[in-house]
Amino acid sequence: MSELDSSESCLASDPGIPTLQKACDPVVLGEYLPEVLPSEWGAIRNVRLQVLRHYPRTHPRCTFEITLGTTRGCYSLIGKVYAEDRSDVYQAMEEIRRAGFGSEDEFAIPRPVAFLAPLRLLLYEKAPGTSTKVLILSPNESVRVLAAERCARWLARFQAMAPRSGRVVRPSDQLISLEGWWRCLADLGGSLADKASRLFEQLKATALGLGSIEMCAGHGMYTCSQVLLLEGRTVTVDWDSFNVADPSHDVARMLVYLKRVGLKHLGSVHALDGAAEVFLKTYVATGRAYVRTRLAFQKAAICLERAKRDVAKQAHGWREDAEMMLDEGLRMLEQELN
C-alpha cells in the first residue's frame, strides 16, 4: 500500500467517543480498509478525511467523509463513529438492501461496506444526489412537487417491503417519552410549562382512542434532510434511528419538519403547506388512507419533542421556536377534535 496522505484531514476530538481520534486517523484507517473495500477499487494510495457533522451530546457520534485515491480511481465513503457499538445499524442496512433497496435501485439506500468494531465505525458508500431539502425550498413549484412526491413514494415502498427489525416503538413507549419531554419543559415554568402541560394532557387523552394498528419498518427520523434525489433514483440515508413503529410516525415526522423548514427559511410555518399536502396526498394514494386518523396525535407528539430539543439546544430564538412548536401541537389536536 502506498504512503497515506492525511494533509487534508479535519480531525475531531470528543472524550464521549473513545475511538474517535483513531477512527479519524488516516493511517489507522489505512490498516483496516483494505480488508473491507471492494477488490475492484484497487490498492489504496491515499486517504483524506473531512468531518461533516459532530453530535457531542445525546448519543454522541461523528460523521465524516473519506476520500480514497486508489490504483483504480477516486472513491468516497461516509464514516460514522459512535460512542457505543452500533453494528446493528450496519446489519439493518444490509437487510434493507437485500429486501430490494440496493444502491442502484429506484428506491435505494447507500451501500453498506462494513462495521469496524474496534473503532465503532460504520462505513457506507457516499450516495450521489441532491438533498430534497434544497429542492423543497426551490422557488419552482414543480420542483417542490416532484421532491415531495418522491419522498412519499419512497416511504410507502419502504414500509411495504422492508424487514421489521430494531426497537419496537409501542404507544406505551411513546407516552413514556412524551412524559419525559413534558417534565423537562414543565421545569421552566411560565407559558412554556403551561402549554407543554396542556399538550401532554391532550396527547394522553388522544392516545386512548387510537386503537391498534399493524406496525411496520420505520426510519425513525424521516425528513427531507435524509432523502437524496438523482435521475431515476431516490436514496434515503442516516439509519441510526431505525425501528418498528406505527406507519404514521414517519409520515408525521416529515410533515412537522416541513413546518420547521418553512419557518426557518421562509418565515412561516405554513410556507410549505403545499409541499406537505402533496407529500401526504401521494402517500395516501398508495393505499394508506388509514394513517390519517393517527396523524394528529403523531404530529403533536413530535411538536412536543421538538420543543424539548429547542430548549435543550438553546440556539438563537430557542424560546420562540419552542413556543411555536407547542402552539402547533395544540392546534393540531384541537383541529382534529373539531
Image (spheres, rainbow, N blue to C red):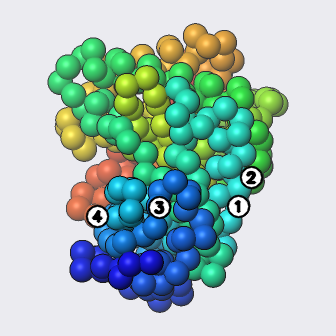
Dot 1 crowding, Cα within 10 Å, few <14, some 14–19, many 20+: some
For this rendering, which residue is in front, 104 or 270?
104
Report the side of 142 relative to 335 (left or right).
Answer: left
Q: Residue at x 38, y 78 (%)?
A: 2
SS assignment at label 4: loop
First in sequence: mark 3 or mark 1?
3
- The image quadrant that residue 333 belongs to is top right
Q: Nearer the viewer, mark 4 or mark 2?
A: 2
Q: Nearer the viewer, mark 1 or mark 4?
A: 1
- Residue 91 placed where, x, y %? 71, 56
148, above or below 222, in the image: above
User: What is the C-alpha distance between the residues marked 3 and 2?
Assistant: 35 Å
SS assignment at label 1: helix
The residue that mark 1 highlights is: 88
The residue that mark 3 highlights is: 42
Q: Amino acid at mark 4?
A: Ala
The residue that mark 4 highlights is: 315
First in sequence: mark 4 or mark 2?
2
User: What is the C-alpha distance between the residues marked 1 and 4?
Assistant: 32 Å
Q: Which mark is residue 166?
A: 2
Q: Amino acid at mark 3?
A: Gly
